[in-house]
Amino acid sequence: MMPQMYVVLAGGTGGSRFVSGLAAVVGQPQVTVIANVADDDEFYGLHISPDIDSHIYALAGALDFKRGWGIRGDRFNFMQAGLRFGGQDWFNIGDRDLATHHARTRWLGEGLSLTAATERLTEAFGVKARILPATDDYLRSSVVTPAGRFSFQEYLVKRHAADRVKAHELDGLEKARPTIQVLDAIDGASAIFIAPSNPVASIGPILALPGMCDALARAKAKVIAVSPIIAGAALQPPTAEMMSGLGLEVTAPSVARLYAHLADAFVFDRLDAEHAEEIRASGLEAHAVDTIMRNGQGRKRVASAALRAAGIGAVRRSGRGPT
Ligand code: FO1
């Protein structure tokens, strides 16, 4: 029997919590992450891939889960030392995190694809899950606000997601394509999950890639989406800010409608149980569960609920992977 392969479309923080929970339940070798790369940016001439790194660090048990990014216990000596030369002071890159970006940039400079560089980073961290960039092509989110057009990191980190969002744009979309590894993963998946990430800035750039939605529509596997919105609020910025700026209601049914053309089922929080009918009306099976992922137990619970929605019993794997 072919080993099960569970594919997760995911962005950063909320996404890596779900991925960690899934890996803890089914085992890392059975997990393939299709990671958003539109948050990528350049600092100190280095290629930063925040969403890819949050999955690597989370699965390696090294993620600072409180912050949701970077390596737990990392120091910021390089950043501090750089300030005296007028270095940037707002995007905080830890010293150990810096080594990751340096290695990725070195390998990209040697001609490796982002997929190949990510495979080396994943292996170096002893992570057994596959982490696939959604595309190896240039694809970057820009956020248009009344104060101007900013890169995603400038909008989110430097300006604290305080600007009203008028538009979200994807630079490079006309040429960007899903990688063959991503298309193969979708084709061979036993189940496909859309993680509780920002539907606009994290899942959106993955789905916007030409051919991605067709691949998901052709997939034999059930597609299960998990809501990032609980009782009208999101775990952290800028999900709610970007949805409302773009005229989307910040509710679970609103997210369900965004995925209704792709997904078969929608897992959302029991605080939104009253919306189950509305979610079913968009053509999705509705599964109301406790979706709060405060700790390892919570992450496994949400992953198990998503597996059940996919018709797969939650395989109990005690003590494997980061809790
Ligand atoms: N987020 C912040 O709010 N402040 C930071 O200084 C910051 C630094 C940072 C460095 C590396 C990295 O991989 C992520 C970092 N993030 C920071 C998080 C990042 O902005 C978000 O993880 C994603 O782009 C959103 O999913």
Image (tube, grey):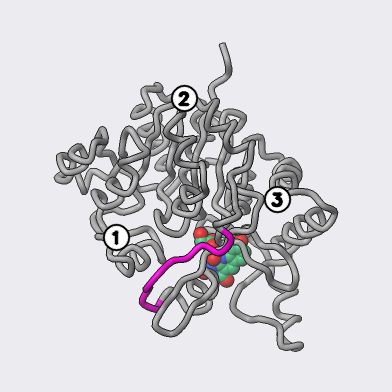
The quarter of the image that holds ligand 1 is bottom right
Residue 271: x, y in percent?
A: 21, 48
Q: Which mark's residue is nearer the viewer, 1 or 2? A: 1
The tag on residue 316 is 2
Q: Is residue 225 left or right of residue 218?
A: left
Which numbered dot is residue 146?
none
Indicate yes or no: mark 2 CB to ligand 1 under 8 Å.
no
Question: Which label belongs to residue 233?
Answer: 1
| Residue displayed at 40% across by 21% down | 313
**Residue 67 in view of the camera:** no
Q: Nearer the viewer, residue 315 or 130?
A: 130
Range shown magenta: 162-172
Quadrant assignment, res 34: top right
Secondary structure under tag 1 reads strand
Position of 278 with respect to 262 (left or right) is left
* Among the two numbered marks 1 and 2 on one chain, the one whose residue lies closer to the N terminus: 1
Q: Can residue 234 be seen in this view?
A: yes
Q: In front: 83, or 47?
A: 47
124 part of magenta stretch: no
Give the class, few, some or many, for how many residues have Cα within 10 Å of label 2's Cα (few <14, many ≥20).
few
Give the distance between the C-alpha atoms of the residues marked 1 and 3, in whole angstroms: 33 Å
Crowding at dot 1, Cα within 10 Å, few <14 / some 14-19 / many 20+, comes out as some
* Residue for point 64% across, 36% down: 181
Q: How far apart are marks 3 and 2 (CA)?
A: 33 Å
Q: Which of marks 1 and 3 is nearer the N terminus?
A: 3
